[in-house]
C-alpha cells in the first residue's frame, strides 16, 4: 500500500485519471479523524521497526574511543577508481599508518599527526575511518641489514641468439630448424 493510499484511503489521482468520474466523498470530520488515526498507526509501526533495528545494531556494536597519544590506522577507500592519498586499485592497502592522535575534537573526530608528504590533507578525521593500532611484537618482521662486500657484476654475458638456437634444436617435434632462429652466417 502506498503512503498516499494509507493516509487518504484512496489511490492518488494524477492528471491522467482526472477524466474518470466516480463516487464523490464529502470532506468532513469523519475523514479528518480517519486520516489522523491512520497517521498515528503508521508512526507507531515505524517507531517499533526503528526500535527493533536499533536493538540489533546496539547488540553488535560498542562505542569506540581513542585517547590522545594512541596510534591509529587510517582507512583509505578500497573502491575501484577512487583515489585517496595517492593510493588506487584493488591491491592497495585498506589502512595506512599508524599515526599518532594529537587532539580529540568532540566525540566523533580526532586530529592526527600526519607525515610531511601528507601535509596537503586535512588532519581531522571521523572515528569511522580510524582503526586502533595494536602493537604485537610476535608478528613483527625484523629486517636484517644487507652488507655487500663488493659490487655485483655479471660473470658471463648470454648470447641470446645462441640460446634461442639451442632451445629450438632440442624441441621434440623436430620442426626446429635454423631458419626460424634467423642465423646471420
Image (cartoon, helix red, strand yellow):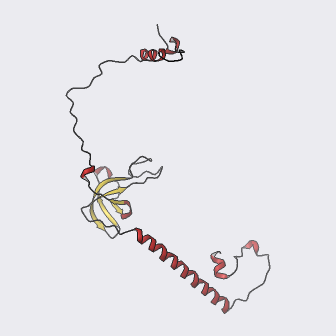
- Left or right: 39 in relation to 99: right
Q: In the picture, residue 67 is in which quadrant?
A: bottom left
Identify which residue is drawn at 58% across, 80% down: 42
Q: Indicate the quadrant containing the N terminus: top left, top right, bottom left or bottom right.
A: bottom right
Which residue is pictured at 24% across the width and 52% down the height? 137
In the rendering, at what x and y percent does residue 17 appear? Answer: 76, 74
Q: Residue at (35%, 62%) from the top-left corner?
A: 125
Q: Is 49 or 12 nearer to us in this picture? A: 49
Q: Position of residue 107 (x, y in %)?
A: 33, 70
Position above or below: 164 against 27: above
Reply above or below: 68 against 94. Answer: below
Residue 56 location, quadrant: bottom left
Location of residue 14 in the rendering, given as x and y in whole percent from the top left corner: 71, 73
Number of numbered discs present? Answer: 0
Q: Is residue 134 toward the left or the right of residue 58 in the image?
A: left
The residue under the point 54% across, 82% down is: 44
Whole-percent x and y of residue 129?
38, 60
In the rendered structure, the answer to whether residue 60 lies left or right of residue 175 reads: left
Furthest toward the bottom, the residue is: 29
Residue 119 visible in the current orientation: no
Residue 8 shows in the view: yes
In the image shown, does 117 or 7 lie closer to the viewer? 7
Residue 20 appears left or right of 129? right
Q: Which is nearer the eye, 95 or 16?
A: 95
Amino acid at each position: 500500500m502506498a503512503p498516499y493510499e494509507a493516509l487518504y484511503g484512496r489511490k492518488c489521482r494524477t492528471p491522467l485519471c482526472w477524466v474518470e468520474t466516480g463516487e464523490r466523498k464529502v470532506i468532513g470530520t469523519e475523514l479528518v479523524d480517519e486520516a489522523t488515526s491512520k497517521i498515528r498507526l503508521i508512526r507507531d509501526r515505524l517507531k517499533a521497526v526503528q526500535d527493533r533495528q536499533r536493538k540489533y545494531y546496539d547488540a553488535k556494536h560498542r562505542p569506540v574511543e581513542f585517547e590522545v597519544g594512541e596510534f591509529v590506522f587510517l582507512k583509505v577507500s578500497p573502491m575501484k577508481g577512487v583515489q585517496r592519498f595517492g593510493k588506487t586499485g584493488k591491491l592497495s592497502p585498506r589502512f595506512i599508518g599508524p599515526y599518532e592522535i594529537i587532539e580529540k575534537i568532540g566525540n566523533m573526530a580526532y586530529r592526527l599527526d600526519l607525515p610531511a608528504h601528507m601535509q596537503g590533507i586535512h588532519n581531522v578525521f571521523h572515528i569511522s575511518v580510524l582503526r586502533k593500532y595494536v602493537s604485537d611484537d610476535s608478528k613483527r618482521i625484523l629486517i636484517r641489514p644487507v652488507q655487500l662486500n663488493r659490487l655485483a657484476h655479471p660473470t658471463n654475458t648470454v648470447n641470446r641468439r645462441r640460446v634461442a638456437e639451442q632451445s629450438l634444436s632440442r624441441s621434440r617435434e623436430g620442426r626446429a630448424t635454423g631458419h626460424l632462429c634467423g642465423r646471420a652466417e
